[in-house]
Image (tube, helix red, strand yellow):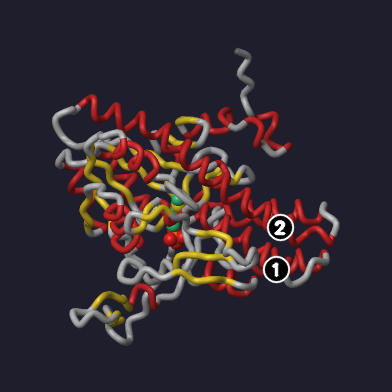
Amino acid sequence: MKVAGKAMRTIWLEEDGQGVGIIDQTRLPFRFETLILSDVAAMATAIATMQVRGAPLIGAAAAYGMALAMAAGVEDGDVERAHARLMATRPTAVNLRWALDRMREVLLLTPPGDRRERAYAEAAAIADEDVDICRAIGRHGLHLIRAAHQRNPDRPVRILTHCNAGWLATVDWGTATAPIYLAHEAGIPLHVWVDETRPRNQGAFLTAWELGQHGVPHAVIPDNTGGHLMQHGQVDLVIVGTDRTTARGDVANKIGTYLKALAAKDNDVPFYVALPSSTIDWTLEDGVAGIPIEERSGDEVARITGLADHGGLETVRLVPQDSPAVNYAFDVTPARLITGLITERGVCSPPDLAQLFPDHQPPERMGQVPVNDE
Ligand SMILES: CSC[C@@H](O)[C@@H](O)C(=O)COP(=O)(O)O
């Protein structure tokens, strides 16, 4: 997508064929800065500190992290150590495990002397596939937005989104935002309600910034506003992303997503989740019981960084010095609250997810996937 009118991705290989470029997302929206990462330690830090974040981008970044590791050592032990190191960075987004397992499998099947080159090629393939997948999600989701527009052609389609499932969270296009960008390109009038997404403000800082760069009309709202807007008919549909989707369609996404789904259910507002298949954890059914929820530092709740009137970035404290703060980064929305899953293969209701991906089923689930005889 575009930054100041110039097309770019969120992660790229530098011209030296070794360093990996990223946008430092901890500086947005106030500073646009890129970084060059030169070793696996720098990539692990970038993921853990959320310089790169969002489930699909975490996967692509981890893949490039494996490539950086191979530039330093190509033995089986180097592969395993890099896999373990990167796997420890963040627990909830399953794309991390998906990408690391794919890289490990490919690398262990490759002669050590060819591993460095193979690792960069596989990481590039993962990044390119992510772009294609997000574009396909966009095409499928566009039909939903177009249908909403046809129902009410005289006003913009009002879409609520939570956190940042935009192009910054992927390699390009985004998941929840891909249908929005395609609808905007198609001339469908839109208005996006952007949840600020405390405590890290991915909505206010990242989604608002990227929608603004593309001229998509939007407004940032405090996290508690969505229910009120839905009660007053101000939301036509909700589209969010996910960090891990279970086989039965439970969805882990940024903390607060569950409350939006409850409000949507109570107000008959369709609630969609956009996801690449790399986000599906086929080994889990019950997301509330099974998905590990990342707990981050209470400091992220207690302090906030923003742009001061003098133009510098300043961090201030928001809660009393002695009050502890608790910071669960994700929650789980049960499948029963979800209208549809927008995947690269089409839109389905949660119980039909396995039918859309029969080829992705692990052997232990094969007997449970209904066979379509048509
Ligand atoms: C397309 S990204 C989907 C999710 O990763 C996104 O909604 C989200 O929760 C991101 O969380 P973050 O903690 O910023 O990595």
In this rendering, would 301 be left or right of 288?
left
Point 23% across, 59% down: residue: 222
Q: Quadrant of ligand 1?
A: bottom left
- The span from disc 1 to disc 2 (Cα, nearest Å) is 9 Å
Q: Upstream in the sequence, badge 1 or badge 2?
A: 1
Q: Which one is in front, 168 or 229? A: 168
- Seen as rendered, the residue at the extreme front is 15
Q: Quadrant of residue 114?
A: bottom right
Q: Amino acid at mark 2?
A: Ala
Residue 354 vs 126, above or below: the answer is: above
Looking at the rendered structure, which numbered label has been put on residue 69?
1
**Secondary structure of the residue carrying numbered label 1:** helix
- Report whether 263 appears left or right of 17: left
Using a 10 Å C-alpha cutoff, classify the residue at mark 2 as few (fewer than 14 neighbours), some (14 to 19) or many (20 or more). Answer: many
Q: Is residue 35 visible?
A: yes
Q: Amino acid at mark 1?
A: Ala
Which residue position holds label 2? 119
Callout 1 touching callout 2 (CB < 8 Å) = yes
Q: Position of residue 52 (x, y in %)?
A: 49, 64
Q: Residue at x 22, y 56 (%)?
A: 221
Q: Position of residue 199 (x, y in %)?
A: 34, 67
Q: Is residue 344 above or below residue 251?
A: above
Tell me: 121 left or right of 10. right
